[in-house]
Image (cartoon, helix red, strand yellow):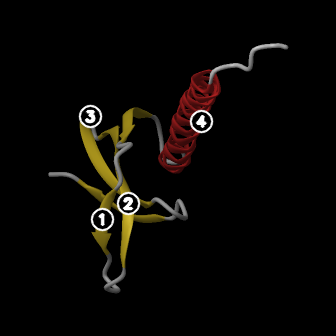
Amino acid sequence: MAKSPRPWVYFAAGALTGLFTGAVEMYWHQRSAQHLLDHRLQQVKDLFLQEGPIQGSWIESQAHPYTGKNGRTTDVNYGGITRQENGQLRQYEFIMDVPTGQLLDIYPLA
């Protein structure tokens, strides 16, 4: 009669499968989140490129709570664009709604 496997073998196989699945899911989620941020930054850059070339751009990956003028609170990403205007660099910051990707505000920095 064959000896039955020990219970710890099943436990170890389940634990390793869970760890592997979790690692793959975390990697996929981070890549898709970064791709979405890159796409949203490109949308803002395209708006600025209609008026001329830009020098640089950035977007924060960390979401921040933001209360709009209407009193509604939502999570937002902050970002920025630098462009040449009248021979000088001018910086703009923008606020983008995380759930919808809607551009909430664009304003020049001092």
Given contact means CB atoms under 8 Å apart, are the residues at marks 4 and 3 in contact? Answer: no
Cα distance between the residues tagged 2 and 4: 24 Å
Given contact means CB atoms under 8 Å apart, are the residues at marks 2 and 4 in contact? Answer: no
- Residue sitting at the far bottom: 70
Pointer 1 residue: 65
Of badges 4 and 3, the one in the foreground is: 4
| Residue 90 in the figure: left or right of residue 24 | left
Disc with the residue nearer the chain's start (3 vs 2): 2
Pointer 4 residue: 25
Residue 56 percent location from the top left of the image: 37, 32
Q: Residues within 10 Å of mark 4 (few under 14, many from 20)?
A: few
Of badges 2 and 4, the one in the foreground is: 4
| Residue 2 in the figure: left or right of residue 51 | right
- Residue sitting at the far left: 110
**What residue is rendered at 30% in x and 49% in y?**
92
Disc with the residue nearer the chain's start (4 vs 1): 4
Cα distance between the residues tagged 3 and 1: 36 Å
Pointer 3 residue: 87
Pointer 2 residue: 76
Of badges 3 and 2, the one in the foreground is: 2
**What residue is rendered at 26% in x and 42% in y?**
90
Cα distance between the residues tagged 3 and 2: 32 Å
Cα distance between the residues tagged 4 and 3: 47 Å
Q: Residues within 10 Å of mark 3 (few under 14, many from 20)?
A: few
Q: Residues within 10 Å of mark 2 (few under 14, many from 20)?
A: many
Disc with the residue nearer the chain's start (2 vs 1): 1
**What residue is rendered at 75% in x and 14% in y?**
3
| Residue type marked 2 | Val
User: Please, what secondary structure does the residue beneath circle 2 have?
Assistant: strand
Asked which quadrant contains residue 42, the reply is top right
**Position of the N terminus by quadrant:** top right
